[in-house]
Image (spheres, rainbow, N blue to C red):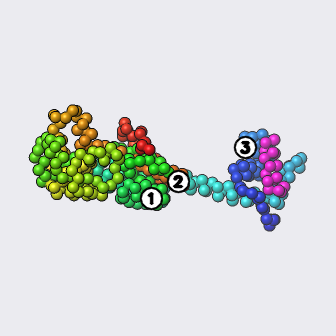
Amino acid sequence: MSQRRITLMGQLGDVDLRLLRIFRKVVECGGFSSAEVELNISRAAISMAMSDLETRLSMRLCQRGRSGFRLTSEGHDVYEATMQLLAAVEDFRTRVNGLHSRLTGELNIGITDNLVTLPDMQVTEALRALKARGDNVHINIRMAPPNDIEMAVLGGSLHAGVVPELKRVPGLDYLALYEERSALYCSDRHPLFACEAPSVDQIAGHDAVVPSYAQTPEIKRVHEALKPMASATDREGVAFLVLTGSYIGFLPTHYAQRWSDHGRMRRLVPDTSEHATRYEYSTRYEYSTRYYAITRKGRPPNLVLESFLEELEACLSQTPLPEREAPPSA
């Protein structure tokens, strides 16, 4: 067998692979005429493809004419190299396609605190579905403030995050997840606990705990109606202080339910008879926060992350929320 070195100038592209597949079929069929049926292209097209391949390789691959089809010594070497190359391409295709049902890798996700009790927490279901798709997927969850999560997603140390609506950050993509309702609470040790409908003035006169973490301007205005005498960096800190009986404070309704169900907290619903409408109550003593899944714009391909987002969107489509479409305000 010839030991002549074969040099392919430039990059190997789709055109080269197509020509090499035609060449392989011609060799396997023993000529242009027989390959015509197998390839489902004309003999003239096959001849043109072979000429193109020979030009690209700068060598004669076969003899064709009245004497029949015959490979040159270079043609034999190219045929063997072609078989190895096409087998490697097919192996690559099979292995990559197999990853769709056999995922391997990490998913690093950041989540704002105290969301696990949300009834529509589809992140949990999406993580469950992701794990079912790939036993070798390693999930890492980091609990962190929203700003830290945003910076980590932008920096690449986190693949995705779950954060409340604050403002749109350039460089991030947003997927609306759900809304979280918050209301004003006191504990069973607080003077207002026994008051069925405290007045607005009564509520305003009691010490309150307010969040020191980032909030939208609308939510900040809700807290302005309170008497701020303590602060907390997260909702768990608010709950700690409310449970002392010395403070009132806003908590997510799903989060406070664990205590209200056992009589340790109650939601403060003030007397609105002297006020204009129920709307005034709802805007002063309860509010909603939208939550989003965030990922980095222009992120590198990551099959584990894309699979997670695919599962998340599938879960969300099964429990549609009417207000999910709106993106964060700029």
Which residue occupies the foreground of this view, 258 or 192?
192
Residue segment shown in magenta:
44-60
* Relative image position of residue 131 (x, y in whole percent): 41, 55
Q: How many marks?
A: 3
Q: Write down the quadrant of residue 83 in the picture.
A: bottom right
The residue carrying pointer 2 sits among few (fewer than 14), some (14 to 19) or many (20 or more) residues within 10 Å by Cα, namely few
Residue 57 sits inside the magenta stretch: yes
Q: In this rendering, does residue 306 appear at all?
A: no
**In contact (CB < 8 Å): disc 1 and disc 2:** no
Quadrant assignment for the C terminus = top left
The residue carrying pointer 3 sits among few (fewer than 14), some (14 to 19) or many (20 or more) residues within 10 Å by Cα, namely some
Q: What residue type is labelled 2?
A: Arg
- Residue indicated by mark 2: 299
Which residue occupies the foreground of this view, 6 or 308?
308
Please give left or right for residue 104 compared with residue 242 in the image: right
The residue carrying pointer 1 sits among few (fewer than 14), some (14 to 19) or many (20 or more) residues within 10 Å by Cα, namely some
Q: Residue 39 carries which label?
A: 3
State which mark lies toward you, 1 or 2.
1
Which residue is located at x 23 percent, y 45 percent?
225
SS category of the residue bearing label 2 = loop
Q: What residue type is labelled 3?
A: Leu
Predominant SS along the magenta part: helix
Please give left or right for residue 189 compared with residue 215 in the image: left
SS category of the residue bearing label 3 = helix
What's the CA distance linking mark 1 and mark 3? 52 Å
Q: Which amino acid does label 1 sit on?
A: Ala
